[in-house]
Image: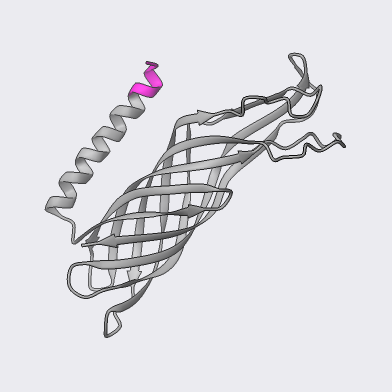
Amino acid sequence: MSKRFLKMLIMLMVFGLSGAFASLVLANQVGINAGLQSIEGAKLGFFYAVDLDESLQLQPGIYYTLRKYKIPPPDWYDIFPPERVYDTVGFIEIPVLLKYKVNLKGPFKPFLFGGGYVAFRISEQMVVDSSRFPGVPVFRSYAYRDGGVVLGAGFEHGRGRIKFNLDFRANIGLGQVQKVEHGVSLFTISPPIENKNRSLSIMLGVSY
């Protein structure tokens, strides 16, 4: 086990334990969310919310998020493969959001939220045959960590403690996560292609 992975595991355990403790002691709302994000990815996790006043909440969370990254051909390659080629990469994402809820009369309450996140890569599954472009090997790598901004809107519905929620969110990653290079043998023959984590998600959840 590498030192980098061990440090990341310890950080996640500390966050999970402190989050569970805080949710029992401080949280006004605890819940789970699940949904889909663009580029055929999934997201699943839990959150807890602490009321700052009647309309404002601080909402940390921890999510497992799965992303698929397209492997593009080089710019000069004019024979495109018959199928799309993707790598699948898993992250643990930790957002901390500030949520503003409009306290309308009745069970329906819209909200806006925004904040930041950090993410750590925990798995990756490379396509078995990375040379789908005949004669052009593909070299790629994925960053161990990422961070950025989360913005979104949605609504919750329910009376009493149990509430159902639906939200739409945008993750705007600030770091270069994917790096793709094409080459011949061990030598690259084109400038690297670099991509950030940018996605739109729809999330369903329940809280109490």
Quadrant where the C terminus is found in the figure: bottom left
Residue 129: x, y in percent?
Answer: 67, 25
Q: Is residue 102 visible?
A: no
Instruction: Residue lying at the far bottom in this picture: please name it.
Output: 105
Q: Which residues are magenta?
A: 1-6
Instruction: Specify the color scheme.
Output: one colour
Determine whether, in the image, residue 147 is placed left or right of residue 99: right
Q: Is residue 93 visible?
A: yes
Instruction: Residue lying at the far front in this picture: please name it.
Output: 82
| In the foreground, 33 or 53 | 33
Residue drawn at point x = 29 percent, y = 53 percent: 47
| In the foreground, 156 or 190 | 156
Residue 147: x, y in percent?
Answer: 47, 43
As displayed, is residue 97 above or below residue 154?
A: above
Residue drawn at point x = 71 percent, y = 28 percent: 181
What is the chief secondary structure element of the magenta stretch?
helix
**Residue 122 placement: quadrant:** top left
Quadrant where the N terminus is found in the figure: top left
Q: Is residue 110 magenta?
A: no
Residue 166: x, y in percent?
Answer: 39, 66
